[in-house]
Image: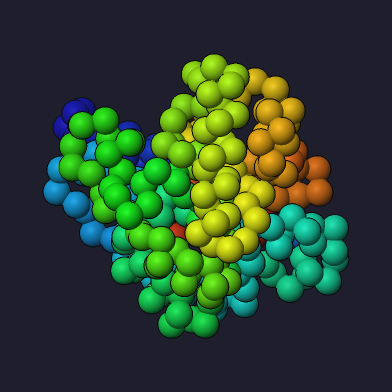
Amino acid sequence: MDGVEYIVGGTAGIAAMASTLFLRHYFRPLRAFAVPVLRYRMIGPPLAGSPFNSLRVTGPAFQQHLDYIARRGFRLVTLSEALENIGNRAFLESKPVALTFDGAYQNLERYVLPALEEYGYKKITVFIASDGIDQDNSYETGGRGRPEPMMGRKALREMANMGVEIGSLGRRSLDLSRLPHQELLEELKESRQKLGEISGKEVKLLSYPRDAQISHAELILKKAGYDYAAWISLQGLLERESLAFRLPRYPLSRKSKLIEIALILSGRLV
């Protein structure tokens, strides 16, 4: 009996702790003057042999996220739109939320765009490693596991014409902090130029590949032609005080729960 009581007590203790954490977040003051920014990696069912399955949000889960966003009266905006209007009270009161995606994988075309269309949404921000276009993401896997197919030039141009914003992940989604200065500049400039040619629009946003930030980011990124850079942050709220080259995005993965979406949209999960 002692063992049984210990197990029950331990389980109850864990449940109580989870409840306490939830209540602590739920009763925090609302962050009314901020834009929630969510970051997705991949959407769809697991791909056998892929090393990225733990980062993949299933299609039904993503649909559930969109349904919650729509039912709560939120509207989608691009990350640039959020940045341009972060000091505009009327804009912030219209309940904007930015959805961002790291990687133009074919599952974006297959699962994300059709799901967005169901709700009349078009505005998202997609960060792309330019060397993967019309190819796969072998540049990421390095021969470890099954590579993921990427979107092509034509599909990306059509997506940009629909209102999807294009940002850069560099050419090869490398850890930028490990590159020598000149190679880093070339990596960033060449990606920006190629993505601009494909989308027909100027590319001003970067997502740090592998979430690895670089020294003297502002100086280097401005020299390469970028105005902003995004990274992963559990805060996930864009505010007037947010740093231009450390824009926060809340990461979502296979294990993410709808309650996380609810808390970040309410401005309480900070």
Q: Residue furthest left?
A: 48
* Residue 88 point in image, percent of width and height: 85, 64
* Residue 95 point in image, percent of width and height: 69, 69
* Residue 161 point in image, percent of width and height: 54, 73
Identity of the residue drawn at 50% across and 59% down = 198
Q: Nearer the viewer, residue 189 or 34?
A: 189
Asked which quadrant contains residue 247, the reply is top right
Q: Nearer the viewer, residue 183 or 109?
A: 183
Q: How is the image coloured?
A: rainbow
Could you tell whether 51 is left or right of 261 in the image?
left
Residue 253 in sight here: no
* Image quarter (top left, top right, bottom left or bottom right) of the C terminus: top right
* Image quarter (top left, top right, bottom left or bottom right) of the N terminus: top left
Could you tell whether 94 is left or right of 18 in the image?
right
Identity of the residue drawn at 74% across and 55% down = 83
Identity of the residue drawn at 40% across and 67% down = 155
Residue 215 in sight here: yes
Q: Nearer the viewer, residue 191 or 13?
A: 191
* Residue 4 point in image, percent of width and height: 19, 35
Is 210 situated above or below 257?
above
Could you tell whether 267 is left or right of 159 in the image?
right
Identity of the residue drawn at 21% across and 53% down = 46
Number of numbered markers: 0
